[in-house]
Amino acid sequence: MGDQGTERESWGPYPLILAGAVIGVLVMFFVDPRWGGFVLGAAVMVAAALRFAGYGGQLSVRSKGIDVVTLAVFGFVLVLTSLLLENNALKAIILSLFDR
């Protein structure tokens, strides 16, 4: 009746990253958006590290290099954005880097 389950689907670390993302969103809504964004960005950067280490599973969408770079940049931007929320001193330092 067809080829049902001929190749087993590998989940790998996907449930761990999904749990971290859910915790990050819950913290963002119920506790503090800054900490929630930080947790969410950290979960995405952990996904990048796991993908770099070879644990693909459901995390592998494209080639390994593209996946690692995309996840790392997205996680870094989330963490940086969460650090910049309501932190005027850090905003001034970062904006002064781009000021000419």
Image (cartoon, rainbow, N blue to C red):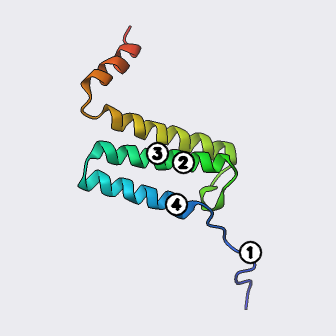
Please state which amino acid type lies under the numbered disc 3: Ala
Q: Are marks 3 and 1 in contact (CB under 8 Å)?
A: no
Please state which amino acid type lies under the numbered disc 4: Leu
**Residue ID at (74%, 83%):** 3
| Numbered circle sitting on residue 16 | 4
Question: Residue 84, located in which quarter of the rendered image?
Answer: top left
Residue furthest out toward the bottom: 1
Q: Position of residue 15 (x, y in %)?
A: 53, 64
Residue labelled with disc 2: 46
Dot in front, 2 or 1: 2
Residue labelled with disc 1: 7
**Residue ID at (43%, 56%):** 21
Residue labelled with disc 3: 42
Q: Are marks 2 and 4 in contact (CB under 8 Å)?
A: yes
Question: Residue 90, located in which quarter of the rendered image?
Answer: top left
Q: Image height check: is 55 above or below 71? A: below
Question: Gap in Å between the C-alphas at discs 3 and 2?
Answer: 6 Å
Q: Residues within 10 Å of mark 3 (few under 14, many from 20)?
A: many
